[in-house]
Amino acid sequence: MGEEPYYIDKISDFIEATVLNEEERGFNQMILYGRDVSVEDVVGNAKRFPMMAEHQVVIVKEAQDLSRTIEKLASYADNPQTSTVLVINYKYKKIDKRKALYKALKKTGVVYESKKLYENQVADWIRRILSPKKYTISPKAAQMLVEFLGTDLSKINNELEKLQIILPEGTQISPDHIEENIGISKDYNNFELRKAIGERNTVKAYKIVNYFADNPKDNPMVVTVSLLFNFFSQLLHFHGLKDKSPRSVASALRINPYFVNEYISAARNFPMRKVSAVVSTLREFDVKSKGVGSNAVPQGDLLKELLVRIFN
């Protein structure tokens, strides 16, 4: 159960592929979907005995569709059929830990809670996923994936698998690989905009914003404002640190050490008082990016106005 479906699918797929051999699956493996069955159907299937095998496997996918009646499963969970491997995939939600079902499952089964990763954890996750497959990835390339795909691990993994088909083992995945094969520009993205603003490189920042204005569907303003808000909030935190050594900064801000120099440079260009003002400005433009008080002003024009406010 949990908000992150990636590991729920991984565990379920592993059980589906490995518990029974190919001959046993025809009679002893059942895939059910929450929207198509009732809890009583699940229990009825789970209580069957296996045919010519030690176990049967019953997998309930999208079990969150049974959320209103899922507690009825508690009586079965108290006394489950020992020859049945019953897998409940309860995505995007959690069952109530105070109620009977959760307590029964903890006693007689295994409950795995798949938690959503924070954005600052995803780049490390990408490196961990690639390592056993003999690939590495540059910090900038990992950051590009996170900024373009967010924290959706399944989407990120799908793109990484495409790259592994194209690139030979031992390759370090670079921003060029990302741009050529996934379609994320290595020069015109939120990562580069953040860097240009931190360096007070107005020419580069306006070039990127003009690109965003010409490609609004691929570069929604609400995402840009959110990422800039996180950056300046971290910068505010940076100004408050007593120990500004690279290791301490990376730990306090929960960033890859590779990016520490960007924060040091930005802190020189944006003193604490200015950072506070920018954070306030970004709050204002976050509301405007969602259509409140902007009088249908194009997002490209709003972004240009935002840059003027940040640099002044």
Image (cartoon, rainbow, N blue to C red):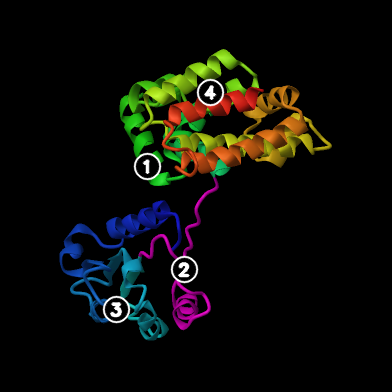
Q: Residue furthest front?
A: 295
Q: Nearer the viewer, mark 2 or mark 4?
A: 4
Label 4 and label 1: CA atoms lie apart by 22 Å
Residue that label 4 marks = 192
For the record, the magenta segment spans 89-118
Quadrant of image for the C terminus: top right
Instruction: State the residue position of label 2.
Output: 111
* Few, some or many residues within 10 Å of mark 4 (<14, 14–19, 20+): some
Q: Secondary structure at mark 2?
A: loop
The overriding secondary structure of the stretch rendered in magenta is loop
Question: Gap between marks 3 and 4, in whole Å?
Answer: 51 Å
Q: Tell us which disc is closer to us: 1 or 2.
A: 1
Work out whether 75 lies above or below 70: below
At x 19% / y 72%, what residue is drawn? Answer: 52
- Which mark is first along the chain, 4 or 2? 2
Q: Residue furthest right?
A: 242
Q: In the rendered structure, which amino acid carries the disc numbered 4? A: Glu
**Residue 39, which numbered label?**
3
C-alpha span from label 1 to label 2: 25 Å
Which residue is more in the foreground, 13 or 224?
224
Residue 100 on the magenta span: yes
Question: Residue 282 vs residue 109: left or right?
Answer: right
Can see residue 113? yes
Amino acid beneath label 1: Lys
Mark nearer the viewer, 3 or 2? 3
* Residue on which the image places disc 1: 155
Q: Is residue 93 above or below residue 222?
A: below
Among numbered discs 3 and 4, the one appearing first in the sequence: 3
The residue at the point 59 percent across, 42 percent down is 283
